Image (spheres, coloured by chain):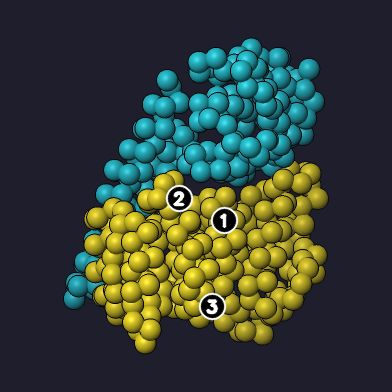
Chain colours: A cyan, B yellow
Amino acid sequence: MIWQRRRDLERRLNDEAAVRLAALSLELGLLAVDLRDQAAANRVMRLQDDVRVVLEELRDIGSELYPPVLVSAGVGPALRAYAERRGLAVTVSAPTDRYPARVEAALYFAVVDALDPFTIEPAEPAGRANGAAGRGGRIAVEVRRCGEHLVAALSGARSGEVSVRHPSIGGC
Amino acid sequence: MRVAVAEDGALFREGLGLLLQAAGHEVVGSVDTGDKLIALVATQPAEQPVEIAILDIRMPPEPDGGLYTAERLRTDHPDIGILLLSHYAETQYLMRVLEIGAERIGYRLKERVAGVKVLADTLERIAAGEIVIEPVLAKRLVEARRSGDDDPLATLTERETDVLRLMAEGRSNSGIASELYVSGKAVEKHIANIFIKLELPGDASVHHRRVLAVLAYLRARRTES
């Protein structure tokens, strides 16, 4: 399943590449202490800054792949974190109950996919009622846009609804 | 200071131990799970307690063993300062950190504490009772623009915005003054203006209440229309 692959990739990014880079950054920090030559120490500190930039980029990719907040706190908090990273002022209503990971992933990515074009271009006109935007087993998510609201509703074995409000969602 | 470390990545754990020593701290133990940290803290002699515990948020017990362990630690040993490290700077984690405690606690990105100076500064602030918040996150919260044109943050001067960001990092008045190269009096004046313009509640002079008020404000403005 695609969400599982995404989550595995995020874990590998965080637990392997990013962990090595964070350790490398520490190593550079130690080297900067040991160096007597101030100019060389400054160069090492600049390298540390470069490592930070790479980590920042990996973090962005990891968040896109499968936000860690989705694992630890569920759909509502993950969508709020998504909006925060993009400087998007939205109101998110989501059930506080946790669902199985595949259901949460289906809901989250359905909403994010529907929000995406409008993040890039806020003036994007109307979206129509979209069919199942995320599927995993018997889960189907239907996304509707209307007025200020974007609603992703589960249908099938589980029920639940996530709603995102923003002045320029459009549609209906 | 006597410091205990819990981090499941061996490379980072070892590097952090060396950096702590280079910064003049004593590492009383480094372990790879939260449960081992609890055991380590419990076995320290009463006259030589752990003063600060550094915990990776994402470690066993999964998924957020660091937060779970920090909670237990704060309940059982409220005097121990806590520094939580993460690969991600998220408001969601910050809120959970603040639920654990609003004093002698910190939340920072791993690679941002990888220098002797910044590590020493972070630990000193925690030991002094402050809340230390990752500047990357504080900056993101202050810079997030609200839709619509009635944003009270837009009424702040550039200097006041700097002061607000440093307050959101959990800095004290003297910390803000030295960051911005201004006097303590000037900082107090800026803070008073910010509290009036943003209509913040409470007493600006009580450190942890002030940080909580600022963060609650910054968080709420993104979700209210």
Q: Which mark is residue B129?
A: 3
Question: Is A159 situated above or below B122?
Answer: above
The residue to which callout 2 is attached is B64
Q: Residue at x 59, y 68 (%)?
A: B102
Of the residues shown, which amino acid type is indicated by label 1? Arg
Q: Nearer the viewer, mark 1 or mark 3?
A: 1
Q: Secondary structure at mark 3?
A: loop
Percent coordinates x, y for residue B220 in the rendering = 72, 52
Of the residues shown, which amino acid type is indicated by label 3? Gly
First-in-chain label (1 vs 2): 2
On the image, which quarter does residue A143 sit in?
Answer: top right
Whether labels 1 and 2 share one chain: yes
Mark 2 chain = B
Position of B136 compared to A141: left or right?
left
Of the residues shown, which amino acid type is indicated by label 2? Asp
Percent coordinates x, y for residue B205 in the rendering = 69, 80
Percent coordinates x, y for residue B74 in the rendering = 51, 68
**Badge 2: residue crowd in 10 Å (few <14, some 14–19, many ≥20):** some
**Badge 3: residue crowd in 10 Å (few <14, some 14–19, many ≥20):** some
**Badge 1: residue crowd in 10 Å (few <14, some 14–19, many ≥20):** few
The residue to which callout 1 is attached is B96
Q: How many marks?
A: 3
Q: Nearer the viewer, residue A98 or B55?
A: A98
| Disc 1 from disc 2: Cα separation | 11 Å
On the image, which quarter does residue B138 sit in?
Answer: bottom right
Position of A35 compared to B173: left or right?
left
